[in-house]
Image (cartoon, rainbow, N blue to C red):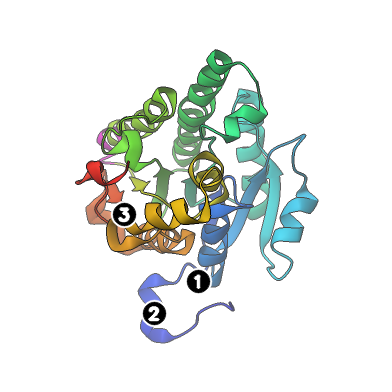
Amino acid sequence: MGMVTNSLLAPFLLEGRTALVTGGTGGIGRACVRRLHAYGADVATTFLPGTETAGTVDEVFPDLDRVTAHPLDLRDTASIDACLEAAEHAHGGIDILVNNAAVGSATVAAFSDDLRTQDTLMLAINADGTLKMSQGFLARESEHGHQREPRKLINISSVGGGINVFPGFRVSDGMSKAAVAFMTKQLAAETVHSNVDVFAICPGATDTPMFDASTLAELTAVERHAFEDGLPKGRLISPEEIASIVHILATGLSQPLHGAVLDASMGLGVHPGMLR
């Protein structure tokens, strides 16, 4: 998809802005990189050292210019600081931070076989790592003084934990997503007079590698069909749909939503009994 230039879309254009999208090589992050880039933003994204490389990002986005790749390990404060510094140096600043990188109940198993250690890592990566990324981003606003356009902090949480409770949902996973939703509201309260807007998006069942690993992979074709048929609207959410919400929040149109924790689950958040 080439950059959108239709003048009727001027309020949605992001030319001259830089977005840092963490975990941009797959799922929602990948869709966000493409969406924000298509509307004119320069984009920095991240890869996990030891698992991915900058070359991994190049392979995912061979057709995009203005995209840079930076190592990020959310378990490591020094890595978080270095990532923010590198992205800022590469693009001259960071206007939009999309905190997308996270682990789920299946993907965290790549770090440890021990369930208790996995729970600790879930909270360290999803909650504490996201907190430190947010704090580093907000600190950079004060360092650079007043800017004409508001900066945007967009956190990706989940309907599980961020909006509602689902029996059988892994406790540490839900806790970490609830922490992101709370953090969003707290940081929004503290920045009501600052030149930054803060939001969270809580997706429902989304067609991503993470959701596939945690939920869909163990289902037979018949079971998967029944599962999807029972979801709101009878289908999974696409990553591109979540990326479109991120895009709206990244524009100047979103300021009245400062502090919002958005239920992006097609109704699952208000009817959690549908997911069984």
Does label 1 or label 2 sit earlier along the sequence?
A: 2
Res 230 label: 3
- In percent of width and height, residue 22 lies at 57, 45
Does label 3 or label 2 sit earlier along the sequence?
A: 2
> Distance between the Cα atoms at labels 3 and 2?
36 Å
Q: Does 174 appear above or below 270?
A: above
**Near-viewer residue (234 or 263):** 234
Element marked by disc 3: helix
Identify the residue at horizontal 25%, vertical 34% (top origin): 189
Q: Residues within 10 Å of mark 2 (few under 14, many from 20)?
A: few
Identify the residue at horizontal 65%, vertical 31% (top origin): 73
Range of magenta residues: 188-193
| Pointers 3 and 2 in contact (C-beta within 8 Å) | no
Element marked by disc 2: helix
Q: Is residue 105 visible?
A: yes
Is residue 155 found left or right of 82 in the rendered image? left
- In percent of width and height, residue 40 lies at 53, 70
> Distance between the Cα atoms at labels 1 and 2?
9 Å
Res 9 label: 2
Element marked by disc 1: loop
| Pointers 1 and 3 in contact (C-beta within 8 Å) | no
